[in-house]
Image (spheres, coloured by chain):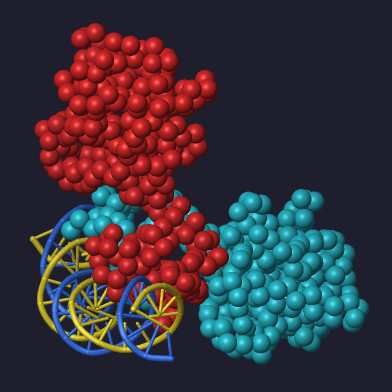
Chain colours: A red, B cyan, C yellow, D blue
Amino acid sequence: MATDPFALDFSALRVLRLVHGHGSFSRTAESLGVTQSTVSYTMARLRDAFGDPLFVRQGAGIVPTDRCEEVVAQTSAMLDRFEALTAPRQFDPAVAKLEIGISCNYYERVTLIPKVMRTLRQKAPGMAIRIISSTVRGKEQLMRGDSDMLIGPIRLEEPSFFRRGLLPEDYVCIMDPANPLARTVQDVDTFVAAPQVVVNYGGSFRSRFLVVMEAQGHYPNAVMEVPSPANLPDILVGTDMIATVPRRIAESFGAQVVIRDCPFLAEISIDLYWTARTHVSAPHVWLRAQIAAAANRILTKEAGAG
Amino acid sequence: MATDPFALDFSALRVLRLVHGHGSFSRTAESLGVTQSTVSYTMARLRDAFGDPLFVRQGAGIVPTDRCEEVVAQTSAMLDRFEALTAPRQFDPAVAKLEIGISCNYYERVTLIPKVMRTLRQKAPGMAIRIISSTVRGKEQLMRGDSDMLIGPIRLEEPSFFRRGLLPEDYVCIMDPANPLARTVQDVDTFVAAPQVVVNYGGSFRSRFLVVMEAQGHYPNAVMEVPSPANLPDILVGTDMIATVPRRIAESFGAQVVIRDCPFLAEISIDLYWTARTHVSAPHVWLRAQIAAAANRILTKEAGAG
DNA sequence: AACCCATATCGAATATTTCGATTTGGTTTA
DNA sequence: TAAACCAAATCGAAATATTCGATATGGGTT
């Protein structure tokens, strides 16, 4: 074929990065909404342009060649720089039409995102938000371009990420209002002994209060683990179990459960992260401001009520 | 139109860089061997992708916008990095088919290039060499990608260039064998007074011996200026004029002229320059080695003869 | 106002990309 | 060992995009 490498466009490089990330042509095709044939064709052009198979079949799947790793590393950086370069510099929320991807978890979907969306429907009706579950993969999602922003109780120290603090948060206990522990759970020994539903967030993430507890040599009486706090009230009501969750999640459950202080003080910060790719993009700048504003409204309202 | 910027390929960015360099769509079209209509179409896509006119008409020609300067600076760097990335890593001279551009002047075309070409015809018949006249623009040609290598008696100090010394060179006088000055021209006063044909290399370049002379307060009796040493014998023979040229150019004229020492010692070095763009490219590495080898053969032969 | 220059635009010809269907090559399962 | 299975490669046809040659447009100059 002898393709001129200069005929490759940035979409092709994006396909390469996706194939590298997914380890599969078909999966990449699906995620792009095109056929596997198209991905195959693009890969053929890439292979020809770089004079290397890039991926070789091995067992079930495919593995990248050394050259591929080099090419992906280089072109991935180019993609990010190019995206930053082409990002719109001015932006009219009323008419702009675009989609922004946010990587976050249940907490943010309950507390922050609904408020942001209410603002967006009014001020930027053409802006679509695509939420993906970050679980423990948020950092990769952000780096790989699967999402544009990451919100969560995490700390990324690499200087390649930009951060903006949004909300301070702490943990509280929740339980059935009829649960007799409601009177005594603030006590350390009672808390430790109480039958606990532990939220493991579906991955290797450990809630901060667990880390604090264990640092002090205490281990919860975990009688159940769930991946998400989403339906905790349904689980807790009618039982003697308690759960320990971030305060604002507890508050979102309303009167279904009662809230009590957790004897282990565990303070965390919900932060917003992004990369150089979107740093100067006007719509992204604007959306980040809206998210920060929503966080501030939450804090102000709480201060007024408290 | 609303073009997706990711649909732009590197050729399009190259067109942008060329238009920026030439200050003209038509000139760019010509240099690429396509019609002006095609360049216009590509520019339309670029304008749309970057959401900016990039070039605006002003008086006779066009001037780049601020955004254009930013885009060209960024994408030009990407082009170079991409070229380095796609450069072939292994290379079989016997079968490789490619073209390499060399920027140089008459001296190199006479002394070095013929030897290199003789090697190339034998070892790399598929490699084409495109020589462009560097005059005083060699550095820009190299930076802009108009050529891949630059050979000449120049000194580029920027760290963005790679250098390899090829040949030391000095100046000698040449004249008609019948010219009586052949006996006395080594004398400073005689040399200064002799009717001289000065080679000005068609630009602002001044031969090193002139710089040395003038530093000592002497000015040649320039009775004629020519842009190139190419046909000096035709000019000198049958007259009382002398010319002062690099020794190996003089030698290339054979018995048409006699060679005498020039009383002003002016030593220069003929160097080979290239950039990161081609630094790791196997064919370029190979060709640079052939050029260096040709230079060494010249030196060895001279040492043997002398 | 007429002219000149360079870019923009138009319709037709050409080239490339995409799709849906099928084949190929290799691994797992019966 | 064959059958089944999976993912990538390939094929022909349809849909898109690019290029050309010719012509229009628009600003600056005579």
Q: Residue at x 41, y 21 (%)?
A: A192
* Towards the viewer: B124 or A11: A11
In this rendering, is residue A74 above or below B151? above
**Image position, residue B157 (x, y; %):** 66, 52
Instruction: Give the quarter of the figure containing the N terminus of chain B.
Output: bottom left
Write down the quadrant of residue B104 in the picture: bottom right
**Image position, residue D2 (x, y; %):** 37, 90
**Image position, residue A122 (x, y; %):** 11, 33
**Image position, residue A219 (x, y; %):** 46, 26
Q: Residue at x 38, y 47 (%)?
A: A141
Write down the quadrant of residue B283 in the picture: bottom right
Q: Residue at x 44, y 55 (%)?
A: A76
In this rendering, is residue A119 above or below A21? above
Is residue B19 in view from this perspective? no
* Towards the viewer: B50 or B259: B50
| A258 displayed left or right of B23 | left
| B124 displayed left or right of A299 | right
Query: Total of numbered circles in the picture?
Result: 0
Instruction: Give the quarter of the figure containing the C terminus of chain B.
Output: bottom right
In this rendering, is residue B121 above or below A257? below
* Towards the viewer: B266 or B275: B275
Q: Residue at x 80, y 79 (%)?
A: B297
In this rendering, is residue B74 above or below A29? above
Is residue A91 in view from this perspective? yes
Write down the quadrant of residue A264 in the picture: top left
